[in-house]
Amino acid sequence: MKITFTLNGQTASGEAAPAQSAVRFLRDVMGQKSVKEGCGIGECGACTVIVDGKAVNSCLMPAAQLEGRVVETTEGLEKDGQPHPLQTAFVKHNAIQCGYCSPGFLMNAKALLDHNPAPERDEVEKALAGNICRCTGYQQIVDAVLDASEVMRKGE
Ligand code: FES
Ligand code: FES
């Protein structure tokens, strides 16, 4: 089945296998290798992408549901050769160790900041509650998101 959608601001299309999940379609067909499959059952957040402005677990979404939708992945965060403030802040705060969880956290954090540019710490923690990280202990990730929100508000 041919799926046509908007991927990181560009019209894109690809052939999805019957019953293929969005995470497998985005990785295997559309080359979005940032999108990670962890648990495959909606528990870890590694597969998080933004669909029509909302963070979703792409392991739970059939690829067919991407038809006509607007999809954002970590591949689309960089603009004009510059990392997104969230990416810069994750590096600055050592919020990335093995990195397997990082794209999911980044996309969930982006969806939060797109809707709430000045979140409180507890709002960040709540927004990221569905993402599991085995390495960092979470503190650095929350610090990074709060730092990025400040940088973005100042337009730095
Ligand atoms: S792989 Fe989708 S939530 Fe874990
Ligand atoms: S950095 Fe390793 S799982 Fe999060």
Image (spheres, rainbow, N blue to C red):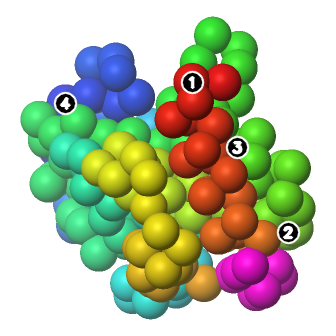
Identify the secondary structure beneath mark 3: helix
Q: Quadrant of the N terminus?
A: top left
Residue carrying label 4: 4
Real-space Cα distance between discs 4 and 1?
34 Å
Residue carrying label 3: 87
Identify the secondary structure beneath mark 2: loop
Few, some or many residues within 10 Å of mark 3 (<14, 14–19, 20+): many
Few, some or many residues within 10 Å of mark 4 (<14, 14–19, 20+): some
Which residue corresponds to the image point at 61% horizontal and 58% vertical from the top-left? 146
- Whether disc 4's CB lies below 8 Å from ligand 1 is answered no
Which of disc 4 and disc 2 is earlier in sequence?
A: 4
- Whether disc 2's CB lies below 8 Å from ligand 2 is answered yes
Give the number of the mark in front: 2 or 4: 2
Residue carrying label 2: 98
Q: Are marks 3 and 4 in contact (CB under 8 Å)?
A: no
Few, some or many residues within 10 Å of mark 2 (<14, 14–19, 20+): few
- Horizontally, residue 89 falls left or right of residue 30, namely right
- Horizontally, residue 31 falls left or right of residue 50, namely right
- Horizontally, residue 104 falls left or right of residue 87, namely left
Which of disc 1 and disc 4 is earlier in sequence?
A: 4
The amino acid marked with disc number 3 is: Gln
Give the number of the mark in front: 4 or 1: 1
Is residue 65 something that shows in the picture? yes
Magenta region: which residues?
A: 133-139
Identify the secondary structure beneath mark 1: loop
